[in-house]
Image: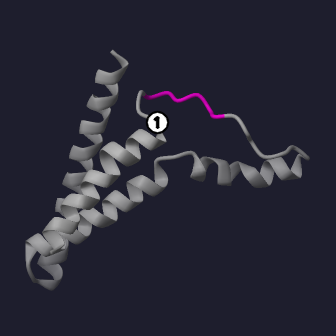
Amino acid sequence: MLVVRGLRQAAVMLAVGAALACAAAGVWVAVAGGDFGQRLGISLIVVGGLIGLLSGTLVARAETSDARAFLGMGPEREQPELSGALGPVGVFLFVAVPLAVVGLVLAG
């Protein structure tokens, strides 16, 4: 059950990432002209990189590190509860990597 939920979450994230990249490439082609396929590839690489970078707990921990230091507490060591079925490594492997690979193929 948890595996199906994680794969469904990855499929939704892939679809949203691809739609966002298509929209960005469409705007880019409308403004500057050029080949849609190559611009779509670059957009997919950027979206995959952003999803891979921002999917983990790095951003959330960076936001709280100053407050924890001010209060005299050490850095967080334990893994926070994951509300979704797909963790940061799963998002990287099942969403960011496929988007980047397809983007590299399209960018040529």
Is most of the magenta stretch helix, strand or loop? loop
Q: Report the residue at 29% width, 42% height from top.
A: 13
Q: Report the residue at 19% width, 75% height from top.
A: 28
Q: Is residue 61 above or below residue 8?
A: below
Residue lying furthest right: 72
> Magenta region: which residues?
79-84
Q: Report the residue at 9% width, 72% height from top.
A: 36
Relative to 45, 54 lies left or right:
right
Q: Is residue 40 magenta?
A: no
The quadrant of the image that shows the N terminus is top left
**Residue 43 location (% of width, % of height):** 25, 67
Task: Count the numbered circles shown.
Answer: 1
- Secondary-structure class at tag 1: loop
Q: Is residue 32 above or below residue 62?
A: below
Relative to 45, 91 lies left or right:
right
Q: Is residue 40 above or below residue 35?
A: above
Query: In which image quadrant can residue 105 be found?
Result: bottom left
**Residue 106 location (% of width, % of height):** 14, 68
Q: Amino acid at mark 1?
A: Gly
Q: Report the residue at 74% width, 41% height from top.
A: 76
Residue lying furthest top: 1
Residue placed under numbered mark 1 in the picture: 87
The answer to whether residue 26 is visible is: no
**Residue 85 location (% of width, % of height):** 41, 27
Foreground residue among 26 and 85: 85
The quadrant of the image that shows the C terminus is bottom left
